[in-house]
Image (cartoon, helix red, strand yellow):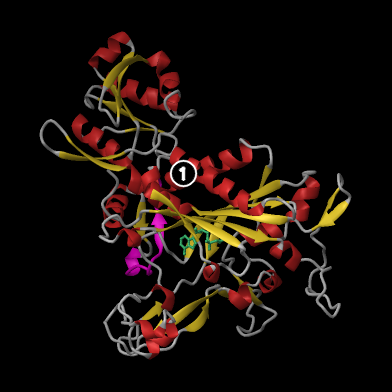
Amino acid sequence: MPAPNIETIVSLAKRRGFVFPSSEVYGGLGSAWDYGPLGVELCNNVKHAWWRWLVYERDDIEGIDSSIILNRMVWKYSGHEETFHDPLVDCRECKSRHRADKLDLTSGATTAGGDIAEMIRQRQVKCPSCGSTDLTEPRPFNMMFRTTLGAAPDENDPTALAYLRPETAQGIFINFLNVQTTMRRKIPFGIAQIGKSFRNEITPGNFILRTREFEQMEMEYFVRPDAEHLTLVDEWVEQYVEWFSSLGLDRANLRLHEVPPEELAHYSKRTVDIMYRYFPERAEEERQWEELMGIAYRTDFDLRSHSNKPVDGEGKRVNPDSTEDLSYFDEATKQRFYPHVIEPAAGVNRTVLAVLMDAYSEKTNDKGEMRVILKLSPRLAPIKAAILPLAKNKPEIVGMAKAIKRSLQPLLRAVYDDTGGIGKLYARQDEIGTPFCVTVDHQSLEDEAVTVRDRDTWEQERVNVSDLAQHLQSRLI
Ligand code: GAP
């Protein structure tokens, strides 16, 4: 049973130290969240799982970590300055702002034919905040965060203007030749990157699902111009569905969405989104889904755009600002070309939210009390083992428990806890997803063995202290 709604996870996340509303002491900052001690571990484990899967376990992918602030020309030639817009609508009545494409258009009569601007003109669309139909026409709003570089620059000086990156992908494209030549790579190969991205979203919300600052795990896979690009998109979709399943997501809560041509990003010839059921409480099945990640065929758009060689119909350089040509020379065929790109782009935060929702379960104990169990995949669990003394007033038991914790520390994330009765301690660890509780009792002092309790089954087994590390490690895959 996954979480019934996102609010259940918001409350658990705050209560147990996964995610806190940001800047709370100053009344918060709309839709900004801080990851607490358990949240940062969970995020790191998701990122490590992704990195291991793509960079370590495959032979054809390298990793990089590029700057967040890039030369402004990157965003000019990537097309983001001109096209990275959302349609913004103001409500004249309550002054709230909304994304036109996210307004509820179901009430509109058909004369406007689905044209949002026309429907707004005909006053068929309501403000989601106050219900008024007095809305402005949609106008483009660029989502890139602007900043200025250098000491005391004039805010409007175009030479000092810079952006916080809205996607990690461009840092990969502009480093394509650096990576390819230094790592002596032949096409096909990929470059992976994890990092923060920033978008001035008009309507952020739904906890960590849509925020202005978020983290992406993107990979650009470079292939030949004559490769089977559309089939490759399907192959990556399949691999990602498998990967999400390996993180514990139920296949029934994932589904695919072929993005219609009129909604494709400016660089994409085809995009398939993997959607997660973030809103199971919504009666209408169609409204239960939101994008978890997208897999796009970006053609050779980006490498070509950042190169100094391509010319237009009149022989003029399309990019007079670039100093390099990002084409690739294929030794085997003696051909030079701009590689085409398949891009699986996933969000760390959306993955974390999906993982938390899917892991959520409730169980009633033999006293009839409801307990929350977070059935996280052991490799994602923030804490792998909690070492608990059965009697905290017995120095020998406490000493032995602390020594066991210290001995496990270099191998796995373990904690020691004696802040409550054993039932309460178990319940706390279940709720934060710790796969194993290790209890040290009076008997342990004599037989050098401990009780290992399984989070999901609540079954217990006796394990020799000398075998404990191996016992736990073999179950943490
Ligand atoms: N380079 C392609 C790209 O950025 P995208 O679909 O705009 O594609 C990829 O973003 C992923 O990044 C999304 O599927 C989502 O998981 C995450 N993402 C995008 N905007 C986000 C936001 N405002 N808050 C949280 N995650 C976001």
Does residue 372 appear left or right of residue 222 in this picture? left
- Residue at far top of view: 447
180 left or right, relative to 21: right
Neighbor class of circle 1 (other Cα within 10 Å; few <14, some 14-19, many 20+) is some
Q: Secondary structure at mark 1?
A: helix
| Quarter of the image where the N terminus is located | top left
| Figure quadrant of residue 308 | bottom right
- Report the residue marked by disc 1: 244
> Which residue is drawn at the image coordinates 39% and 90% (left, top)?
121
Q: Residue at x 62, y 54 (%)?
A: 230
**229 lies left or right of 146:** right
Tell me the quarter of the picture where residue 144 sits: bottom right
Residue 454 % position (x, y): 30, 27
As displayed, is residue 102 above or below residue 336?
below
Asked whether the viewer can see residue 262, the reply is yes
Q: How many marks?
A: 1
* Residue under the image location 70 percent in, 51 percent down: 222
Magenta-drawn segment: 24-37
Residue 398 shown in magenta: no
Vertical order, 112 against 306 (above or below): below
Q: Nearer the viewer, residue 111 or 276?
A: 111
